[in-house]
Amino acid sequence: MMMLLSIAVALLAGLLMTRLMNRFHLPDVTAYLLAGVILGPCLLGRLGLPGLGFGTFEQVQLLQPISDVALGFIAFAIGSEFRLSHLRQTGGAAVTVGIIQAVVATIFVDLSLLGLHFVLGDKLPIPAVITLGAIAAATAPAATLMVVRQYKAKGPVTDLLLPVVALDDAVGLIIFAISFGAAQAMEASTVNLVAILV
């Protein structure tokens, strides 16, 4: 029962925060993020008041099925936005931008963390550097789609943005698979090229 009350308070807080953020001309997704931080285990949840926020990270973890369903709806919404005619027009540019931004993000994070490796030594091993760099390629489509929908954005940038966001997850998975395979090979001191490619 307390979990339902906490969810209701979270929904109400998100709604009220959107009204506040609209005065500052900020997107609704910013309001939802702030409401989550405020009601999370690090701020109001820490007070331990029943129904007011989430006191532990375990309580937040219990909401994972709701989050998974919401992400499924978001993925469905992105898929329903695709039009074959738009993909023909922006397909090449979307593939180019999607691949380049994911690879460049991975390279920059890898280089930055590699610099930290030389400063910290074994506290940040090279396999961890490679794996963390691969994670940098992934982005969440939810915020992008929410902002596009809220402002009813139309035009060439939006037409390019949605395929890039969808493609980004696929590119991120490929980069992660290669990087994680390389990191495992470095840990085991043997290279299994078949495992990396598969």
Image: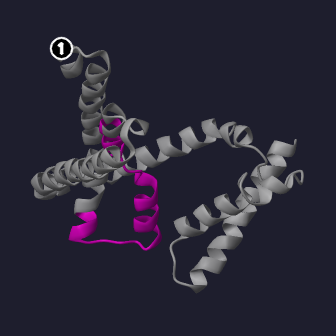
Q: Nearer the viewer, residue 133 or 129?
A: 129
Check residue 158 for magenta coloring: yes
Classify mark 1: residues with Cα within 10 Å, few (<14), some (14-19) or many (20+): few
Q: In which image quadrant can residue 124 be found? A: top left
Q: Does the image show residue 102?
A: yes
Instruction: Residue 149 in the image: state x and y as whole percent.
Output: 43, 65
In the rendered structure, the answer to whether residue 143 lies left or right of residue 192 reads right
Above or below 102: residue 161: below
Instruction: Residue 103 in the image: state x and y as whole percent.
Output: 20, 47
Check residue 176 for magenta coloring: no
In the rendered structure, the answer to whether residue 39 lies left or right of residue 157 reads right
Mark 1 residue type: Val
Helix, strand or loop at disc 1? helix
Instruction: Residue 155 in the image: state x and y as whole percent.
Output: 25, 72
Q: How many marks?
A: 1
Magenta: main secondary structure: helix
Q: Nearer the viewer, residue 49 or 184?
A: 184
In the rendered structure, the answer to whether residue 25 lies left or right of residue 177 reads right
Q: According to the image, label 1 marks what residue?
A: 194
Residue visible at 20% across and 14% down? 192
State the quadrant of the N terminus. top right
Above or below 24: residue 128: above
Residue visible at 65% across and 58% down? 36
Q: Does the image show residue 52?
A: no
Q: Nearer the viewer, residue 35 or 177?
A: 177
Q: Which residues are drawn in magenta?
A: 130-159
In the rendered structure, the answer to whether residue 127 lies left or right of residue 146 reads left
Q: How is the image coloured?
A: one colour
Above or below 149: residue 126: above
Residue visible at 54% across and 68% down? 30
